[in-house]
Structures are given as structure tokens and as C-alpha cells.
Image: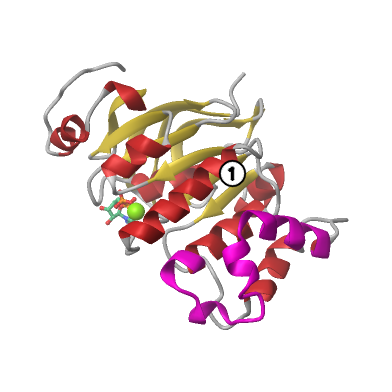
Amino acid sequence: MYVLEVKNLTAGYEKLRIVRNINLALEKGEVLSILGPNGAGKSTLLNAIFGIARIFEGKIILNSKEITGKKPYEIARLGIGYTPQIQNVFPNLTVEENLELSAFKRNGVDVKKEIESIFNLFPEIERRRKNLAKTLSGGERQMLAMARALISRPSVLLLDEPTAGLSPKATSVLLKKVKDIIELNVSVILVEQNVTKALETSNRVAVLVGGEFVYQGNANELTREDIEKMFFGEKIKQEL
Ligand SMILES: Nc1ncnc2c1ncn2[C@@H]1O[C@H](COP(=O)(O)OP(=O)(O)O)[C@@H](O)[C@H]1O
Ligand SMILES: [Mg+2]
């Protein structure tokens, strides 16, 4: 039983088909990294799963329920959390206010309790709960963005380049959090530009080049060099 399945998906914006023939299946408790050069369509694929991009063809199934064509707020309610690449926090609200806004999306939740429980995972931002989000470091800001997506207790978390622009140390701290999240029964799709770190963090990788997957396999099956060659069009192994 898969948590999330994407079947033969073609998606993009208006008349543009950006990602094509995408098939993927995410198991419970798994981190799947999506790797690929700039402009490959990684963000578009996440946007399609979350109901933001236009879907031309194919199906998206979450916990055995088809979500193709649903609106982002419905998809969030059904169990997908999304941390987009940019503008993922409100800079002029405090940490706490950012979290309160996400928590209010669900009916009948004890917002205070939810926030305290999310702080167990992110003590770094608990210390800064009264501070404006714009005063956080890059790493803390990404933690806040992740916390916002997690507060609605999704079964799948989509993370788009959470480590972009972070120092090596902040990158390691953040990716360690991704592993902690798995313990909470959340499955993760991670778009990551640091191939080495992605291989360390994930169970499986999928390589997206020019809008199509050119490789999917276990993270321990290949090296950074193998993957980076694929970015430039070399085919190492074809498993699709
Ligand atoms: N809102 C949009 N409307 C039209 N084209 C877009 C839009 N967003 C991205 N694109 C185009 O889609 C392609 C893939 O972009 P993107 O999904 O952001 O790639 P990646 O995340 O892999 O860098 C690029 O050619 C980009 O210019
Ligand atoms: Mg992107």
C-alpha cells in the first residue's frame, strides 16, 4: 500500500506541458529525493501534486483516494503538507503567529497543543517564538516553514529545496530534521540540489531531466557522479 501514487502525470502551466509521463510511488516512512538540473520541472511536479500546476493527463492518489484536480486547501486537508521553495513563511509575523495561521486550517484542533508539540521537533525556533520570522537565520526560517507544513499532521510532506542557500552546517541540521520527521509516520518527497546530502538523507532517488524521469532507484545504488552525469544527458542505467 502506497501513501502517494502519481500515475502517468503530465502537468504544467496554461498551455505548457512541463513535466511528462511521471510515475512514482511513495511508501510509508520513506524519503524520496527528486534531483535534477535547474529548470527540469522539480517545483512544477510538486506544484502539480499539490493542485497548483495544471494537470493535462494522469492521476494522483493519496492514501487510496484520488486527489487529481482538487484544490490545494482540499489536498492539504486530505493529508499533504507543502513547503514551497520561496515565500514559505510570513516575514512580518512572529514564529508563533506563523504557526497559528497554519494550525487554524483544521477544525477542532487545539492550536496551542499542536504548536507545543511541533516545538518538540524544532527547539531551535521555540527559543525564537516571539521573534518576527524575518529575523530568523536561513536555517531557522526553513525549520519554521517545515513546521508550518507539519502542523496539520500530513501523511506526506513535500519539501522544495529546503537547504538552498544554507551553510553546510545548517544544511546538515535541517536534513537531520527530515529524518526525524519520518519517525512521525510522515513520508517525504524532498527536492534537493545537494546530491551527496540527498543520497545520505533518502531511501530512494528519482532524477528528473527535461521534464521526465530518467532514473528511479535506491539511494545506495549509485554515486553522486552517476547522478550528475544524468543531469547532462548521460544514461547510466535505465530502470523505468
Ligand atoms: N508559473 C509558470 N508559468 C510558466 N512556466 C513556468 C512557471 N513556473 C515555472 N515555469 C517553467 O517551467 C520550467 C520548469 O521550472 P521549475 O519547475 O521551476 O524547475 P526546477 O524546480 O526543476 O528548477 C522552467 O522552464 C520554467 O521557466
Ligand atoms: Mg525549483
Residue range in magenta is 112-140
Q: Nearer the viewer, residue 38 or 68?
A: 38
Identify the residue at horizontal 50%, vertical 80% (top origin).
134
Compared with 58, 80 (above or below) is below
Please give left or right for residue 223 compared with residue 52 in the image: left
Residue 129 placed where, x, y %?
65, 75
**Disc 1: residue Cβ within 8 A of ligand 2's nearest atom:** no
Give the image quadrant in which the ligand numbered 1 is located.
bottom left
Q: Main secondary structure of the magenta part?
A: helix
Left or right: where 123 falls relative to 24 = right
Is 112 situated above or below 79?
Answer: below
Residue sitting nearer the eye, 9 or 192: 192
Q: Is residue 172 visible?
A: yes
The amino acid sitting under disc 1 is Ile
Q: Give the percent coordinates (x, y) of residue 137.
A: 45, 73
Q: Which residue is mark 1?
A: 181
